[in-house]
Amino acid sequence: MAPTLAMSLTGVGPAGLIGRAAPLAFLMAAVGVGFVAYGFVRLSSHFAHAGSVYGFVGAAVGPRTGFIAGWALLGTYLVFPAVSMAAFAVFGVAFLKVTGIAASPSWLPIALVGWALIWLLASRDVRVTTRSLLTFELVAVALILVLVVVIFAKLIFGGAPRGQDLNVDFVKLPAGTSLSTVALAATAGFLSFAGFEAAGSFGEEANGPTRLIPRSMVAAIGIGIVFYLLCMVAQTLGFGTDAAGVKAFATSGAPLNDLGKSYVGAGLAAVLDFGAMISSLGAGLGCAAVGSRLLFALSRDGVFDRRLAGVAESTGAPATALALLMLLDGAGLVAFGAAGTAPIKVFFYFATIGVLSLLVMYIVTNAAAMTYLWRTERRWLDVVLPLGGIAVAGYTIYRNVYPAPASPFDVFPYVVLGWLALGAAAALLVPGFAERLGAQLKLRTETG
């Protein structure tokens, strides 16, 4: 998860849909992600594997389903590092502009600096990687909390830019707002939690993975809920709950930057842009770590060339798989840069593809959790909550593909569908495929 990056971008959409009640979208999303996460937490407490859902879904209900879940997750983490690099460039450009260092900087060199830093850090010892990721994100979160404190202080004691004050109007839906509109707004909040499942990829490197990985997922979601709600309330009240304030929030290209300027000054806006760069770097590091480990696990089991299962002797990191992943993402960035595509468009292009594939994986994993837990423990809670997770993920997919979005976003669902069809064909049609994977999963999956 990248909470700083989420709070730098995702509040605008809900504000445009449900106005001053935007925090309610994130509250609804928190409930939804609780349903989705239940299956992950329960399965990861039973099984641990470097391939994350590939391992514990495969061990729970069979290698074909496990492979399809892992294939969908791979579709996400092949493109998610580029999402983070594009975000690094977006906020890097903003930082250079607000500080006066450059008036119109090119985004591609900035993105490639992020690309190089992520590759360097992801190739180190896993302890260095995870500590770096956490450090980056904590620093960025701290910077946002400084702004939140300033906003609340000025709302309480006076000094807000337009005389805004502390109120509870953010819990009131605008007149005529339908439940479906609130649910649509909640999809932005729901997608802000994407990435909580990443801890599962450290199943062969963590100490006591079947105990610590579920705890880390719960902690990430719990901290995210508190942070997101606090930040969304601060942003909503900071812009103002009247019509002018709602319009300013809904049309802001960088809400934290705008609030930093109006409540403190350009200096804090620059610091917040730099904090968003740090968060993007941390998100990219996490994505590269997950993607390379998933490639490693699938290659080790014979899905891809076994040379991709090579690890660095000095660090134990999956160096070959990481190199392939980073070269693919770097090539994508260069191609879009050469085509003159704006970095924010690159961000949303890759993010849409990755998120759609991720949502399919959420559905498969929760279906596997429901099947396995009912077979082994026979508790109705283990049926009801995963079904809720399937419904939430399914509805989010529906709201992202219907009505058909504008071009080129209308093409992306077909790209994801093609990727998933390729994986399903391999799982169902290749002779001996499931048997070979099943033997490898049985050999390498740790149970708890």
Image (cartoon, rainbow, N blue to C red):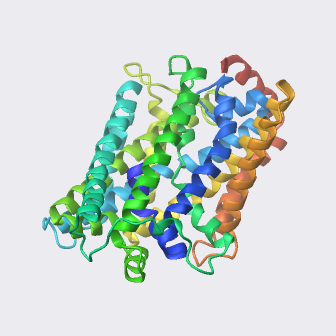
Residue 411's x, y, as percent? Answer: 63, 70
Residue 394's x, y, as percent? Answer: 72, 57
Q: Can residue 415 be seen in this snapshot?
A: yes
Vertical arrangement, residue 149 with respect to residue 431, above or below: below
Q: Left or right? Give the position of 177 relative to 280.
A: right
Vertical arrangement, residue 149 with respect to residue 250, above or below: above
Quarter of image, res 138: top left
Quarter of image, res 8: bottom left
Q: Left or right? Give the position of 342 relative to 201.
A: left
Instruction: Please give the name of the residue rendered at 50% of the width and 21% of the height, measured from the top-left corner.
Output: 206
Q: Can residue 343 be seen in this snapshot?
A: no
Q: Left or right? Give the position of 312 relative to 165.
A: right
Instruction: Please give the name of the residue rendered at 70% of the width and 37% of the height, measured from the top-left corner.
Output: 39
Q: Image quadrant for the C terminus?
A: top right
Nearer to the camera, 85 or 181: 181
Q: Left or right? Give the position of 238 relative to 99.
A: right
